[in-house]
Each structure stands twice: as C-alpha cells, then as structure tokens.
C-alpha cells in the first residue's frame, strides 16, 4: 500500500503507527515518508524577483564603496533552486530537492552583471 496525502501530519502519524505494528511482530515493510514541495512554480517567480532585487542592492553597495554607480543590467541568469531541510547548509550545483523533512527552506540563486558608470 502506498499513501499519498496533502495532510503531512497524518502521513507522519501513519508512519509512526506502522513502526508500532512492526514492533508488535507484525510482518510489514515500512519506508520513511517522503515529503515533496509541490508549489515551486508559484514560488519561483516571486523568489527570483526578490533575489534580483537583492543582487542589485549588493552591487550598489560594492559600487558605492569604490566611488562608482551601477548602470544597466548586462546579463542575468537564473541558477538552480535548492529545496533543503530547514536550516540545512547542503548545496549542490545540480540543485537539491529534499524529500526527508516536512519543514523546508527554498533558495533561489540569480547571477546578474551590471554595467559600471
């Protein structure tokens, strides 16, 4: 039997109950639950916009410290999305999609080059 549900608390409860059955000697194969983030498409545009704003602020700080101003965007590239367990420091060039934890952090990476005026 495979269980799919949006009720993550119920899935966790069922997983615990399956472990109790195994502990009682009932022959049962139980795998750890997998938790998928299913709304990345909705979140992606918003996160990339915020990452781009952050890149601009950082570029302005760097330019200001050298007496320059940033100009127009010369290039912009979206990096991989990282979906990790909350507070994880794990990073991968290919991106990560953690399925082991309910609580997740989603990180968007944007590389932007600005002209310097």
Image (spheres, helix red, strand yellow):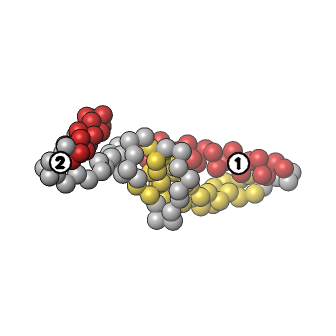
Check residue 74 in the rendering and tell me which mark sits there, or answer none: none
Q: Residue at x 22, y 51 (%)?
A: 30
Q: Residues within 10 Å of mark 2 (few under 14, many from 20)?
A: few
Indicate left or right for 56 with 100 as reference: right
Q: Position of residue 19 (x, y in %)?
A: 25, 44
Q: Position of residue 52 (x, y in %)?
A: 58, 48
Q: Position of residue 29 (x, y in %)?
A: 19, 54
Which image quadrant is residue 14 in?
top left
Residue 79 seen in the figure: no
Indicate left or right for 57 with 50 as reference: right
Check residue 58 in the rendering and tell me which mark sits there, or answer none: 1
Q: Residue at x 14, y 48 (%)?
A: 26
Which is nearer the N-term, disc 1 or disc 2? 2
Residue 38 seen in the figure: yes
Of the pair 17 and 93, the residue shown nearer to us? 17
Where 73 sits versus 10, above or below? below
Q: Residues within 10 Å of mark 1 (few under 14, many from 20)?
A: few
């Amino acid at each position: 039997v495979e269980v799919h549900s949006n009720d993550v608390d119920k899935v966790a409860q069922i997983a615990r109950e399956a472990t109790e059955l195994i502990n009682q000697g009932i022959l049962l194969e139980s795998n750890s639950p997998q938790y998928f983030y299913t709304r990345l498409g909705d979140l992606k545009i918003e996160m990339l916009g915020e990452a781009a704003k952050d890149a601009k602020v950082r570029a302005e700080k760097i330019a200001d410290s050298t007496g320059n101003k940033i100009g127009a965007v010369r290039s912009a590239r979206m990096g991989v999305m990282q979906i990790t367990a909350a507070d994880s420091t794990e990073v991968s060039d290919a991106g990560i999609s953690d399925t082991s934890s309910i609580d997740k952090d989603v990180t968007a990476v944007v590389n932007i080059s600005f002209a310097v005026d």
